Image (tube, rainbow, N blue to C red):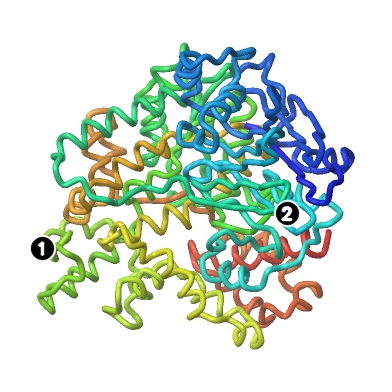
Amino acid sequence: MCGLAGIAELTGRSPEEAVLRAMGDAIAHRGPDDEGVVVEGPVGFAHRRLSIIDLATGHQPMSFDGLTVVFNGEIYNYVELREELRRRGHAFRTASDTEVLLRAYAEYGDDCVRHLNGMFAFVLHDAARGRVLAARDHFGIKPLYFHATPERVLWASEIKALLRHPAVRAARDDEALQDYLTFQFVLGDATLFQGIRKLLPGHRQVLDLASGRLRTDKYWEPSFKLDKYHTEEYFVEELRRLLNDAVRLQMRADVPVGTYLSGGLDSSLVTILAAPHVGQRLKTFTGSFREGPEFSELEYSREVARHVGADPHEVVPTERDFIELLPRLVYHMDEPVAGPGLFPQYMVSRLAQRHVKVVLGGQGGDEIFGGYARYLVAYFEQALKGAIHETTEEEEHIVSLKSIVPNLAALRQYVPMLQQFWRDEVFEPMDRRYFRLIDRSGGALGLLSGDARRRYDREAIFGRFSAVFNHPDTMSYYNKMTHFDLTCGLPALLQVEDRVSMAVSLESRVPLLDHRIAELVASMPPKMKFRGGELKYILKKAIRQVMPAKVMNRKDKMGFPVPLHLWARGKARDFFADVLLSPACRSRGIFDTAAIEALLDQEAAFSRRLWGVVCLELWHRQFIDGD
């Protein structure tokens, strides 16, 4: 786990070492153990290292035979891949996965990425061929941003490093702002900064240094071509095997390893599978709030810790912590994305860093296995529609009204969402209905100024959404929903995962996002994955034997809720008012001041309106205003 920066000059000059060092300094928190800078003709790299594997000889940038790489992440199958490359005649000088990556490129060229099981972002200079290869892992667990002009191409692990280059100016992208107001993340490869893009998950990029041509292509995405030949029992057994193998591989490290443990199904599973791989009691890390039982999952996390004989560590984030830390967290995030859970997640990461250097978590389980209540809401409506009209929009009924009824108790805490969802346009086409389910602009639009509301183009945003949602390989509503969440929603959550851990120099791993697991689950018939509308049906069947009944039978899904609405009426009110009613915020013309004042007193429980606007204003201050 590290931080990287790169410059490729296209005008015949060489990058300035001082600029590279400044870019590296901006992300020093990602790698406090080592640093390096190299300039090779028109290409230069800076690297900051957090040493996890091969602590002695894994220095970067790493070079041999005209190849130089800067790499962030871990190649979990590096041991097996190294043996394969040795059989092909390669000799190794280090025990690092970085050298395995270099020699895999020497052997397989750009297709080296197809041999990697891991989380990675890297930029590699092939001097002999006059080219640069950049790539990002299958799900975008590790970040990689770029800025391209006819004069040069820049890469970096975080946007703040790109902004250290004198040719890059921080300016807001207004189309991306509309995406943020709608989803609280930005679609596609755009960012909230003009001219700064992100290399998308599962993509690679090749720069030809002679012509300046920059070509990007997709090397991987989960295939939803259905396997109709294997039985449910086969899929369950194969899933068990892959879950165990993914955790086994990701426990590889030359430093102490622990787990995040929220008490939810996914983090509990990772903890249970990880415990046998440590030589002592596994250290687990949990956060909760004291504001009420609806903000704490401690009874479940403690049950799992007892179940595996773990050494549990707990932290209680406070309102004061929130006020002090939020501006710093917005800085670390680069962009204001996802929800308020990033604050307690940072607190848990800070706790974990005091005890271990690597931590495993359950991120990705909801997207891979279908764990969001909105999937059940969507199919409840589909079942009603099918029952009334005796039709289906899919090639077969995945759920019927009769089959879904036993699972509707899971929606008890989502009644307000159901009321909002069914307020308008019931039984619209599937893409319109799912857009409504994930659209967070309903409350936010009421906070906008008149000019900002007039500029808001809902149909254009829906067009960008539907281009992803209506993927030609996703024939079922269920696969369309999970595919969208995997490719658009999950990267925003992974950005949080990366930033809150890297902010404290901690490596965070997510074994449920082993690409082999995603490929297996994508190939399953949707009816098998979502039998009777049961969330995570196939995962639950695979792990029932190892999971404590108290966790397995939970009906209350929390997702690290934050008592923001309570704090807005308490000590944090002055903080929110200072940010959102300031002259700077008023002058931007984005929000209606009277609506913001009302919001401070009327924010609903678990709403994201206040979170979304305060993060956006703090982002403007730090990056656009330069505060």
The image shows residue 195, relative to residue 288, as above or below, that is: below
Task: Name the secondary structure under disc 1.
Answer: helix
Give the labeled residue for mark 1.
Answer: 402
Identify residue type, mark 2. Pro
Q: Tell me where residue 357 sits by quadrant.
A: top right
The image shows residue 563, relative to residue 300, as above or below, that is: below
Q: Tell me where residue 299 sits by quadrant.
A: top left
Q: Report the quarter where the N terminus lies.
A: top right
The image shows residue 473, relative to residue 459, as above or below, that is: above
Q: Inspect this view and state whether residue 320 appears.
A: no
Task: Name the secondary structure under disc 2.
Answer: helix
**Which residue lies at the image location 56% right of the left edge and 79% below the top edge?**
445
Residue 144, numbered circle: none
Residue 214 is situated, as x and y percent measured from the top left of the image, at 64, 53
Q: Looking at this view, is 545 or 399 the one in front?
A: 399
Lower position in the chain sequence, tag 1 or tag 2: 2
Residue 243 is situated, as x and y percent measured from the top left of the image, at 34, 31
Q: Tell me where residue 300 sits by quadrant.
A: top left
Identify residue type, mark 1. Lys
Q: Looking at this view, is 288 or 175 the one in front?
A: 175
Q: Inspect this view and state whether residue 36 appears.
A: yes
Residue 384 is situated, as x and y percent measured from the top left of the image, at 18, 72
